[in-house]
Amino acid sequence: MTLKASLIVDKDFVVGEIDERIYGSFVEHLGRAVYNGLYEPGHPSAGEDGLREDVLALVRELRVPIVRYPGGNFVSGYNWEDTVGPRAERKRRLELAWRTIETNEFGLNEFVDWTKKANAEVMMAVNLGTRGIDEARNVVEYSNHPGGTYWSDLRRSHGYERPHRIKTWCLGNEMDGPWQIGHKTAAEYGRLAVESAKAMKWVDSSIELVACGSSTLQMPTFPDWEATVLDHTYEHVEYLSMHQYYGNAEDDTPTFLARSLQMDQFIHTLIAVCDYAKAKQRSKKTMLLSFDEWNVWYHSHAADAARDPWSIAPPQLEDVYTHEDALVVGCMLISLIKRADRVKMACLAQLVNVIAPIMTATGGGAWRQAIFYPFQHASTFGRGRALVPLVRSPKYDTKEITDVPYLEAVAVHDEAAGQVTVFAVNRHLEEALPLEIDLRSFGECRVIEHLVLENENLKAVNTERDPERVKPHAGGDAAVDGAKAAARLAKASWNVIRFSVS
Ligand code: AHR
């Protein structure tokens, strides 16, 4: 078979404006994400506040506009009050989600300080596992009320005169999962979520809320969970959450690379459920999606299962990412961009050390994992309008997933900058894919650069000793001829083709 694919990029075929918050990330009190990740007092790169500047520099490279905190499963046993005020008085707690000891040395205010240095907003989650309405309204008052009340004055007494103005709040985490502390039925959660939402918005009407959707597409309660939760919460929340992780434990790379098709289907179905709820409630509001946990996660499962409980900040979920993982992350990013009309927030889970694009050695260096690059490219160049991807591509079948296009692609038009960027993955493991791009609606086009992430070894990884085994180069061959461009997409590669357009 002669391989050949094509993509039509037309500025009038608009999916929607990309909300930059789809390039968000996530920091949980888990493993070495916070301790020895963000925060390591005494580290050569840390200032007086203990924040690692080498990590911050890499986070800034990712241009992450919003970071979810403090969990994750952790939030369902979280007492935010333990994390504020003088450090010497903070309580140590058994942390039941990940079976560690939480010292609370780093807390809510320290995280807000960190996000300022990282140029990001906070997406804060409240505990609807062991706690509820009272805790939720109090933490909004502590964080956002200017002063003159018990909780807001407590914040001021902690050295934060001005309110944090945290705009985005998650109503718990994965409450559909039996592993969750305080797991609930959809009806139980729906009731608690709506009453918490009302109280939180009575404290601060400017906030936006995210209700918990299903933990994965595979949950037996999906999509009834969403339908029931929306029955209760529709008019009181702005977003419904989605979570999804993929792995390649079976070492079946063609299937692994095709997983993003299931992510497309997940988003598609959830939009249908939201629109059903809208019709049922005769609502004028359109529910938006917050894909606030997504990534590849499987390399660390065995090591984590073998670990003893009750230590402080042990290495947990420390996946070392391969080149093929980076391709899957690239495909997942394309899935998010393709639904920019409804997916308005998303968080790569997570940011540092824990299933993360950035790794650190305690007392040592910080480096970029393979998945760092597609995320950085999308976050940097994927701003503007998402265009409908009119793709023609040869396809393949796996046992589980059929009609998988070798080409996964989407284009983004940044009108202000006069640029179009095509993100493209060639899923073919043996052959390059010639791609023709029809830029018919644009005038003069010029290739700015064609970045390529390719590797002879699908399992190649970056480590502290060898941090650049997987890294992109700018040697792609994209070229323009009139209103058409042509490029050769290397086998198993991630590509970013940037055009200047008139
Ligand atoms: O990101 C790791 C964990 O995955 C989160 O704590 C939880 O929400 C999800 O199951």
Image: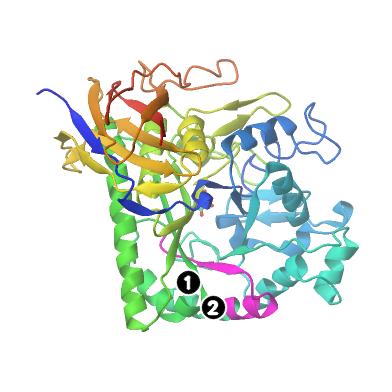
Q: Is residue 6 above or below residue 279?
A: above
Q: Is residue 501 above or below residue 144?
A: above
What amino acid is found at the position of numbered circle 1 in the picture? Answer: Lys
The residue at the point 40 percent across, 53 percent down is 340
Quarter of the rendering occupied by the N terminus: top left
- Residue 382 placement (x, y as % from top left): 46, 41
Tell whether 385 sits left or right of 468: left
Tell whether 483 sits left or right of 336: left
Q: Is residue 340 above or below residue 162?
A: above
Q: Taking the image as drawn, is residue 495 in sight?
A: no
The residue at the point 60 percent across, 64 percent down is 169
The residue at the point 34 percent across, 25 percent down is 493
Q: Taking the image as drawn, is residue 387 in sight?
A: yes
Crowding around mark 1 (Cα neighbors within 10 Å: few <14, some 14 to 19, many 20+) is some
Residue 276 found in image quarter: bottom left
Q: Is residue 403 magenta?
A: no
Q: Which residue is mark 2?
A: 192
Q: Which residue is mark 1?
A: 184
Which residue range is magenta in the image? 197-214
Q: Is residue 138 above or below residue 12?
A: below
Label 2 element class? helix
- Residue 430 placement (x, y as % from top left): 23, 20
Q: Nearer the viewer, residue 429 or 426?
A: 426
What amino acid is found at the position of numbered circle 2 in the picture? Answer: Leu
Q: Nearer the viewer, residue 418 or 340?
A: 418
Q: Which mark is residue 425?
A: none
Crowding around mark 2 (Cα neighbors within 10 Å: few <14, some 14 to 19, many 20+) is many
The residue at the point 63 percent across, 32 percent down is 58
Instruction: Work out whether mark 1 precedes mark 2 in sequence or the reverse, and give the earlier one.
Output: 1
**Residue contact between numbered discs 1 and 2, judged by CB atoms under 8 Å:** yes
